[in-house]
Amino acid sequence: MTTVIIILCLQLPKMKISYMYHEKSNSPTENSFLKTEYERSCQPKTHIFFLKTHKTGSSTIINILFRYGDSRNMTFALPRISNSFFYPKYFSPESVKGFSGKSNQAFHIMCHHMRFQLSEVEKVMPNDTFYFTILRNPIPLMESSFSYFKSFKIFQSPKSLEDFLNNSVKYYKEDIAGSHLAKNIMAFDLGFNNNGRESAKHFKLTIQAVETMFDLVLISDYFDESLVILKDRLCWTLDDVLSIPLNIRSNDTKKPLTLETQDKIKNWNQLDWHLYNHFNKTFWNHVKRYGNKRMEREVEELRKKRTEISQICLQGEADPETIHDRSLKPFQSGIAKIRGYNLKLGLKEAEEHLCRKLVTPELPYTERLLKKQYTNSPTSKPLSKNVKQLKPRNKNGAE
């Protein structure tokens, strides 16, 4: 593990400013309503990389990026095949549709699933790209993963999450399809060995590597606060990060966890637990520097806007079998029931256009972007029909 991280850091063509350095802020104090010089002069960032981690609210973030780039005719780095960059293999530029290797100035936004490898991403994205990702408390994350990925071999035999944790020696094998989904999944997505050594030294090295590679790490458990910080760092507006929660699991497929089970999840996912704890602390340093009262005001305003747009657009949340428009049905996986939305009837054309984009799932929106960017060239088969990539398969091809 030490070797992997050191190599990863040494290979960086350019050292990204550390997360802790970015904690330094020119934001106004809580009692100030005046814009700072930074706020008046900052320009919206247009080169953006988002590492989409699993079961962390990333589907909502990616929809924000889709809509922002789509409305401004930005160019997306899209997967050549399926809806991921050959995940769970390490990312390589060859997985990007339209990438020639001659120039890295063509793409504005990159945000589909991958196993992160900074040196390879930098071959695709411009030098001034803003890198960010999102983490989640590993306890609810693993409960969600067990439900969502139940169809993968790694989770097929255990009768319950408790059974898996109590008998991990029996059930967990690194060569079983989907094993990366069952232990330290966030560390795996970030490009680290999810089965590496468990020591304070290695946890520290991993954290330092993430701080070096990413400009910002959001926390899913404080989603609205994260959107406000993201808005500020990208020099966007609240309207730019306005969103409707996507890929929401029905409550009837959620299971409360005992304190004993929660402790076992922490012990099983120690690397993820240390990553989460560290970046949860640094996130609240962001909030403090942003201004607690200022944050409260903007979160309240964001939630008010979300309520208003929901009342305009939506009939409400709906189970998948009751969603009338097939293009708005979210992908279903495992034993989880993923809810979606029905649009209100009688919307005006402009309203319908906006409302539809707000709740379009990742697969159909990706199809839309592919058609928009590559109408005059051969495209991948429609993702909604090519669902093979979302079903369990061998270790080098699982979703």
Image (cartoon, helix red, strand yellow):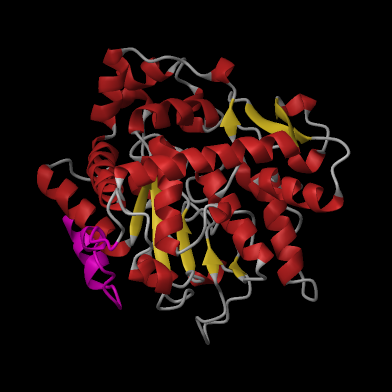
Point 34% across, 71% down: residue = 37
Boundaries of the magenta span:
1-26
Q: In this view, which residue lies farthest toward the bottom? A: 102
Compared across the picture, whether 245 is left or right of 170 comes to: right
User: Image height check: is 389 above or below 28?
Assistant: above
- x then y, percent, for residue 248: 58, 31
Query: Residue 110 location, x and y as percent?
Result: 53, 64
| Residue visible at 27% across and 22% down in the picture | 264
Q: Looking at the image, can residue 110 be seen?
A: yes
Question: Foreground residue, 11 or 159?
Answer: 11
Residue at 43% across, 25% down: 143
The residue drawn where x is 67% and y is 46% is 358
**Residue toward you, 133 or 118:** 133
Left or right: 334 as drawn, with respect to 201: right
Q: Residue 384, can we see it?
A: no
Q: Quadrant of residue 76?
A: bottom right
Whether 343 is among the magenta residues is no
Left or right placement of residue 121 versus residue 83 in this view: left
Q: Nearer the viewer, residue 259 or 382?
A: 259
Residue 386 percent across, percent down from the top left: 72, 49
Image quarter hosting the C terminus: top right
Image: 247 above or below 101: above
